[in-house]
Amino acid sequence: MCGIVGYIGNNAVADELLNGLKNLEYRGYDSAGIALNDNKKIAVFKASGKLANLKAVLHEKNAKNCSSFMGIGHIRWATHGAPTIENAHPHLSNDGNLVLVHNGIIENYKELRQKLQNHGVLFHSQTDTEAAVHLFAEEYKKCGSLEKAVRNALPQLKGAFAFVIMHHAEPDKIIAVRKNAPLIIGCGKGENYVVSDIPALLGKVSRIIHLNDDEMAVVKKDEVIVKDINGQIIQKELEKVDMVADVISKNGYAHFMLKEICEQPSILRKVMQAHVQKQKICLDDAKIVVDFAQVQKIVIVACGTSLHAAMVAKKVWEEWLQFPVQIEAASEFIYQTNLLDEHSLVIGVSQSGETADTITALKLAQKYKAQIMVLTNRIDSSIVRYASSVVPLNAGVEISVAATKSYMAQLAAFYWLGLLMAQKLNKISHDDWQQKLQSLIQLPEKIEEVLSHQDNINLIAQKLADYPAVVFMARGFNLPTAYEAALKLKEISYINANAYPAGELKHGPIALLDENMPVLALFEKGETAPKLLSNCEEAKARHAPVIGIGGAKCSDIFDAYIETPEIEACFSPLLLCVPVQLLAYFTAKALNCEIDQPRNLAKSVTVE
Ligand code: AGP
């Protein structure tokens, strides 16, 4: 996923573009660049690495002296081609007159590249994007109009794209066009913006236009005209920006990740107050049109952290509903034999709503005529278009690449959806309902108690930071929590963290254990605890440092213990995810890692 910003207006263009790119850095930070359309030519400035490197280039080259009032900018998560300056956007046509930035993937870029090269076009990068800029330029030579050139070129492109394009000979307009990648127009007074996501507009405009697929916008200083790809004008409604500037502020926290971890109790309270009442589940802003009585199969597809939330749902729903729930990594779902039909409910879970693997899985589910529901934190995202039922997570924009509050919100949604289905399928008694309701209501306070022990967790993290690899293990409801703990730690500290079912350790992974391989065990109430304790003793016997996390400390074998308030086993994933999030955070902090922008990652993976 990349970040795009376009600006046309009377303010200093370079500053406007940099400000927008800064607020989109969570989308990718492998390289960055801007293009300014001043009276003489199109000036392009690029740098590999973080946005700060681009700022240095702009300073060095006095870019702010460019007398332009329109420009485009891009921040990149590399798909095709390494994160070098040559591959950084914006990309320029051979004649230097047409320039564009792109988010998405052009699937037929190789044949386009070959065809253009046969026409004498010179390529300077390994990107798929460069095929588009030269295609648009070739079409411009034929018709002399940027809008027409883009329209003539689009049918020749396959894949997902959000383009923002300028031409030196038409210095009064920016063209924006989208297909399966988000683009939003920010409408100001005497100025307009084109961006990939709303954080780039915060504090700038209060009215926006969401471009839909196969729509094109001609953006001038005082006018925005939206057309379909055939050139027919489309009347679009101006929408209010429903996000506050607070979202892009750390509010005094050292990192967005810690801020978002600490927001979890309030998010849980908000979700529960909106949906879980004394006797029933309220849908609030969720749209659920599933006829649960007709459902004979439930399949949940997701990636990464969202897949771990789905794994928790499987364990909880199968216990509550006595109904099989299938979990699939979206990237695998698309290749396996899926026995789906109109009696199948396929649930896609995606914080960003732009994850290509998950969207592709839902497109496949549509072919089987399955009922589709999505749980997403971005109801303005692409994934919503493939579902008849939509459950907003309402976690607020999550800036840190490492998902935390959105995971909590996904779990919360799965719990209230589980109660909703249990009620509709008559699987829950009044007393059981009240008991579960109480457990959920008490949770935010219990999470706050865990958050109050950050110092203890930090002390443990300082020691954990010395190890090159660790093992998480669990049994029961928290096996997914162990997977999530390992993912969090590895993605922000780069420590080789892995997770196993505790019972699996003796079948091989125990060979890894020695004094240099800490083992972290996640305890929940009930029958799994004694056996998990035995697994800890087995680890201790191999001289591995052993850390316990969960209810009351249950033995002296632990080298350290993170105690959490008592909670019913089936609700414990909502609680135990917090100490492991904090452990990952403080370990990465001890290692001075780029916590909010870990290497090689981006907030949403919009390529398969
Ligand atoms: C989680 O910390 C990672 N950022 C990553 O695994 C993420 O959960 C995954 O890419 C899925 O993203 P989505 O929820 O936006 O689909």
Image (cartoon, helix red, strand yellow):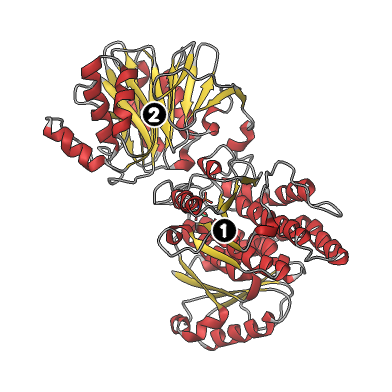
Query: Does any atom of ligand 1 lie closer than 8 Å to the CB of label 1?
Result: no
Q: Secondary structure at mark 2?
A: strand
**Along the viewing direction, whichever of 137 and 108 lies nearer the viewer:** 108
Q: Earlier in the sequence, mark 1 or mark 2?
A: 2
Give the tally of numbered discs: 2
Picture residue at 33% right of the left edge, 30% below the top: 154
**Along the viewing direction, whichever of 115 and 491 lies nearer the viewer:** 115
Above or below residue 424? Residue 547 is below
| Image mark for residue 586 | 1
Q: Quadrant of residue 218?
A: top left
Q: Is residue 550 visible?
A: yes
Q: Indicate left or right for 544 with 578 as reference.
A: left
x%, y% of residue 238?
Answer: 59, 21
Picture residue at 68% right of the left edge, 51% below the top: 264
Q: Is residue 255 visible?
A: no
x%, y% of residue 583?
Answer: 59, 62
Badge 1, how many Cα within 10 Å: few under 14, some, many 20+?
many
Amino acid beneath label 1: Phe
Amino acid beneath label 2: Gly
Above or below residue 468? Residue 105 is above
Picture residue at 61% right of the left edge, 37% below the top: 247
Query: Does any atom of ligand 1 lie closer than 8 Å to the CB of label 2?
Result: no
Frontmost of labels 1 and 2 is 2
The residue at which mark 2 appears reads as: 73
Badge 2, how many Cα within 10 Å: few under 14, some, many 20+?
many
Q: Indicate left or right for 10 with 267 as reference.
A: left
x%, y% of residue 92?
Answer: 26, 27
Q: Quadrant of the N terminus?
A: top left
Above or below residue 108? Residue 69 is above
x%, y% of residue 458?
Answer: 61, 61
The answer to the question of whether label 1 and label 2 lie on touching residues, with beta carbons closer than 8 A, is: no
